[in-house]
Image (tube, rainbow, N blue to C red):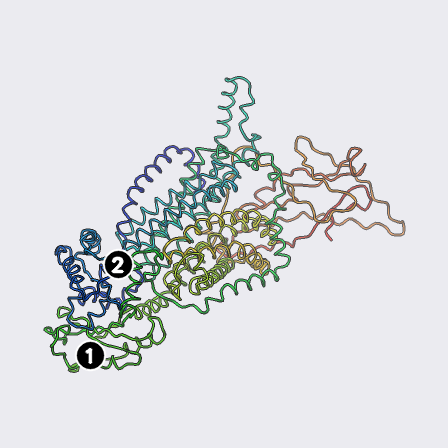
Amino acid sequence: MLSGLGRLIHRRRWFSLVFILLVAGLAGGWGLGVFAKFKAGGFEDPNASSTLVAKLGATYFGSTNPDILVLYKSDTMTVDDPRYEAAVVTTVARLPKDRVAEMISYWALDNEKDAASFASRDKHETFVAVKLKGDDAAKPENYHAIKDRLRAPGLTVRYGGAVPLNEEFGEQVTADIVRAETITALPLLILLVLLFGAVVAASLPLVVAIFSMIGGLAVLHVVTYAADVTSFALEVVTMMGVGLAIDYSLFIISRFREELQRGMAAHGIPPGKPWKQERGRAARRAAKKAHRETMRPIREDALAATLATAGRTIMVSGVTVSAALAGLLLFPQMFLRTIGLAGIATVMVAVFGATVLLPTLLALLGPRVEGGRMPWRRPTSKRAQRDPDSGFWYRLGHSVMKHPLPYFAAVLVILGVLFGPFLHVQFGSVDARVLPKDSATRAVVETVKKDFPNGSAEPIDVVISGDLIPRNWRPTKTGDNIPPYLEDFRKKLAALPGVTEAKFTGYSGTYGGVRISVTHKYEPMDQHAQDLVKTIRAMSLVKDGYPMHIDVGGSTAAQMDLMSSLMRSLPKMAIAVGLATFILLFMFFGSIVLPLKAIVMNVLSIGASFGAIVWGFQYGHLAGVLNFTPTGGVEATSMILILAVVFGLSMDYEVFLLSRIREEWDRTHDNRAAVARGMQHTGGIITSAALLFLVVVAAFSMAGITVVKLIGVGMFVAVVVDAALVRSLLVPATMRFMGAANWWLPGPLAFLHAKMDLREHAPAAAGPATVAVPPPLPEEQPYPYRVHWEQATAAEPVAPAPRPAPPAPPAAAPPAPPPPVVAPTPVPTPSRAPMVDANDVFRPAFHPTPGGSPNGDRPQLVFRDAPRRPAAQQAPWAPWANGQPQPRPVRPPRVKRRIVPSPDGNGWTWSSD
């Protein structure tokens, strides 16, 4: 199917290009509207008791977090000065009533104790809490309508509160994205040129990345109509979209160039522009036209083979990453759910760009993809002639397979050291400190906490509700009679250990509830504060035999509810993602061991990433490098997000590596050779893809918002650990331990897998057959002779030299009759493609060598092409035939063969000792 898609794209490439440009233009215009759709928060559990208390406060009791907190300051006057009062009161009194719903200032409070909390300790500063009219969409407009009218004569003014804070978040997100894309553009282009060795090929991944970013914005805008979206989602989605687009493009372009060169070599077409060798304009024009006509089927076949192999792997990888992100949909938090939705769609956009947009561009370019060739990318370079079984990754794979235990132990020790700090993790909440240190709204929050009497206090809000709450009672008015049962309950709260004050701070006759704020002497996430919340939640209040509802809120209760919600949802996510991943990898690899091992390998990468996050952010060791304020904890929902994203990214590289190993295993059924050759074919590409992704992630690690820095560092460490340790060392070591058990598949599951096989199968290319490649030279060669590989063609057969007869045995010992010749029985294999052994393709023949050769007049070994065995002798194994299960055929044991001199000294022979 994918090969057919490649041929269709090649034949309709201009139509495909116009369609994609039209879609990109519409998506770009639509995507810009997402910036006005972001919502604040999203980290809380919407079904928690603390969330209900916060909503009741905002709706009925008056929010403790005002829409606008206007901070006034005078260097000479205090709040008791009449001029100070006149300047502030006159200013706020002129605010339009259609924009402002409520204002609270120092001079509007009758209670001296409450008024004192609105003035700084030196009384040179005060703030006015302003509540705006309208919904969340109208409040920013109302804020800008009154912002300039809040300036008081003779006083400096600064703005804080929920609306300015959310606005700065959005501006910071936009600035982070622009800065990240600006910083990464040139380094990415340089790295891509170094990797591809051609300017045109290096520029294509950047085109796909831009398309993915545009598509990601459009998708995120669509998500805003289904759910609230936090501004953090924009940076995370952009980071993933750009990174995955470049990774996927790297695999597609590398495979296309490989297939194109193979097709040109099979047809005898030299690289470059051969028509320029012709003399005369007409001759060159005719040669160029003939070259174009010859290349058209080669380009089509190359594109079809690319999508059938690398394209299929990318699609499986995209589905696997999406399955990991789908686990975020099981959490109730808006932050995780919206990033899960937007992330899945963004991954699909990246897959579309790599499998539709990029093939369209490759179909248009063809051999011109090598345009701007660098000096190290020559067609006649020695790199192209290098033995594929002698590269760095091949040697590393053999080294790991030869000494698996030391590599296994060393990697586990490193991963254990990286994971260690996570054992002491402390989770915290998101506040203004996630903004940059020079943030204006953050400065207002920090000033209130530092300079005002109750600025650092974060009380526990207790809401008592029920039909028995009196409708005409006002606890904020002096002289009101307090119902005795409510006063008794307040006194019980005030008498709890560590409580400094408990007072009524809100009442709603409409809702039928009253709020009591409990101030304590502990830090918000201190264990004593958490124990205090548990104690209050365990209390009860009964009036006339009817129990009253008690809901507890505040920052401490909200964090406790968040952790409880995450712990309830995390097992469901682990089961769902693990099961989906196992099924996908089972379909792709045809094994039940490899999927389980891949999940375990990914968990190890995630553990190392979590440990690095705790070390860098909770302990603050990266605060100086990344310029953020450590809070003594890490944000819990961000860790869940990293869990999903890193699991998907790690599985991405696992699919690329194991797909090639599986291909080699199907061809040779040699576990060690399959791992070594799979690493050789994919090690460089995976490392390059990881390096490019690290450049993107590193740029976002320098973002202004601490949560985005945390996510960027987590992804950075996970990718480094995964590419440098897990995929390069730990995976081959474990595959050496398991041996053939890696590919174990019981009979019933084999039948099931045959129905849902997703493995790569490249289509047969048109044109001349591919030139066979001789097997590698044996490791042990007979001294002092040297074995030379020679390719014998069918047109020039080499006649075998007559072998001298062995000496006759003594008369006393009559010669034994020769053993009967038994025709070998073909052994069917479970692979889909017929397997041909190297000894069947290259058969030895002997002929005398000319004089002057290193061997003198001794016979020399050459190899002649042999036809493939008939397809009828290579029928694939049918696990279920004639209504009965069929046992898997047992492959005969492999015999190590080496070339040794003949006993008579006149030639060579095979030895299987």
Question: Residue at coordinates 54% horizontally, 62% vertically from top-left?
Answer: 414
The residue beneath circle 1 is: 547
The residue beneath circle 2 is: 160
Q: Is residue 770 left or right of residue 62?
A: right
Question: Residue at coordinates 57% horizontally, 33% vertically from top-left?
Answer: 265
- For mark 1, does the 10 Å Cα neighbourhood hold few (<14), some (14 to 19), or many (20 or more) residues? few
372 in relation to 447, above or below: above
Q: Is residue 515 left or right of residue 362?
A: left
Residue 639: % across, % down: 40, 61
Earlier residue among tags 1 and 2: 2
740 in relation to 835, above or below: below
Residue 347: % across, % down: 39, 49
* Amino acid tagged 2: Gly
Residue 222: % across, % down: 28, 49
| Image quadrant assignment for residue 634 | bottom left
Q: Nearer the viewer, residue 649 or 791?
A: 649
